[in-house]
Image (cartoon, grey):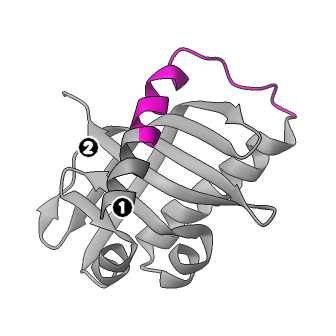
Amino acid sequence: MKRLAAFLVAAIGMTGSAFGQSSPPRGDSTEARIVEPENAGWSAWKNRDRKWFVESTVAEAVWISSGGVTDKAQHLRDLATDREVKGVDRSDQRVAMKTSDLVIMTYTATQDAVCAGLKLPERIVASVVHVKRSGRWLEALHIETPLAK
């Protein structure tokens, strides 16, 4: 648990410096290698696809949202929850390469979704930390902050 807390403090501390930075050029291959899995992650969440989360996130991954803080094991269990996702759109995407093996992505998402009978916030800002391990970019931290209407 101490390791998880230290990871969170470090990752959250770095997210603040990602805001206001411009994205790399559109043709940047690192950005494409981050954006494609993030798109797949939203699709996997919508379709309750455990495989993506098992293969594309680190063992110590953490998710923070209006539902609280969850680790990877709990997130995988939560994927079984009934959900109806009518749509998700992302905008204002930024990718900031912090080190050669750490990237922070931020974006705004508009979603029309209900999980476990609860309507999810319509608009959120997501901050996502990706780390490079064994040559692959994996999601390590996903924070969703609801936006006021």
Question: Can residue 126 be seen by looking at this rendering?
Answer: no
Q: Dots 1 and 2: beta carbons under 8 Å?
A: no
Q: Of residues 136 and 145, which is closer to you in this image?
A: 136
The amino acid marked with disc number 1 is Lys
Give coordinates of residue 49: x percent, y percent.
49, 81
Please provide the residue range marked out in magenta: 10-27
Which residue is pictured at 28% across the width and 59% down the height? 113
Taking 25 as reference, is 88 above or below it?
Answer: below
Q: Most extreme residue toward the front, as rendered?
A: 2
Give coordinates of residue 1: x percent, y percent.
30, 65
What residue would you read off at disc 1?
86
Q: How many marks?
A: 2
Which residue is pictured at 24% across the width and 58% down the height? 69
Crowding around mark 2 (Cα neighbors within 10 Å: few <14, some 14 to 19, many 20+) is some
Residue 122, which numbered label?
2
Q: Report whether 13 appears left or right of 84.
A: right
Give SS at disc 2: loop
The amino acid marked with disc number 2 is Glu
Give coordinates of residue 98: x percent, y percent.
66, 32
